[in-house]
Amino acid sequence: MPKAAILGCLVLLASNSEGRRVVGIDQVPPGSKCTQSAILNSFVGQPASIDLAARLMTAARAPKLRWVAAGQAVTMEHNASRLTVQLDAQSRVLSMTCG
């Protein structure tokens, strides 16, 4: 395989290494703000996945989602449209907060 092709693959992998994926949720209108509710507690303990992200975003009416792995550093900026999901070492949901 040519070096340019290998380099191209590495660039693609690195650009997606932050785990940012766009999940199209028709039920969450653009400009919505995250809403904390008791229904979110039913997701605690579930393994992180794209499907779970979609269900969490729909339940919280959040157009953005941020996964936070165990021990991961995150910015403290508040974003009213974002649902932040804390994960344990096995990538299972520990808790969720808006912001």
Image (cartoon, helix red, strand yellow):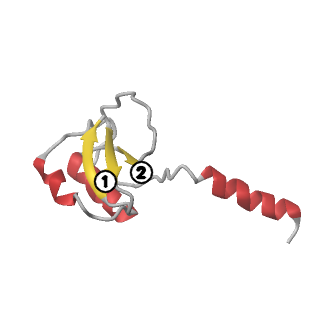
Residue 69 image label: 2
Assign the N terminus to one quadrant of the image: bottom right
Q: Residue furthest left?
A: 38
What residue lies at 39% left-to-right and 27% top-to-bottom? 77
Residue 93 image label: none
* Residue at the disc numbered 1: 26
The part of the image, by quadrant, that contains residue 84 is top left
Q: Amino acid at mark 2?
A: Ala
Left or right: 55 in relation to 6 = left
**Number of numbered tags placed on the structure image:** 2
| SS under mark 2 | loop
Task: Give the mark toward the camera: 2 or 1.
Answer: 2
| SS under mark 1 | loop
Tell me whether circle 2 and circle 1 mark residues in contact (CB < 8 Å).
no
Front residue of this view, candidates 89 and 2: 89
The part of the image, by quadrant, that contains residue 35 is top left
Q: Amino acid at mark 1?
A: Asp
Expressed as whole percent of the image width and height from the top left, the position of residue 23 reads 41, 55
Answer above or below: position of 68 versus 5.
above
Left or right: 46 in relation to 41 = right
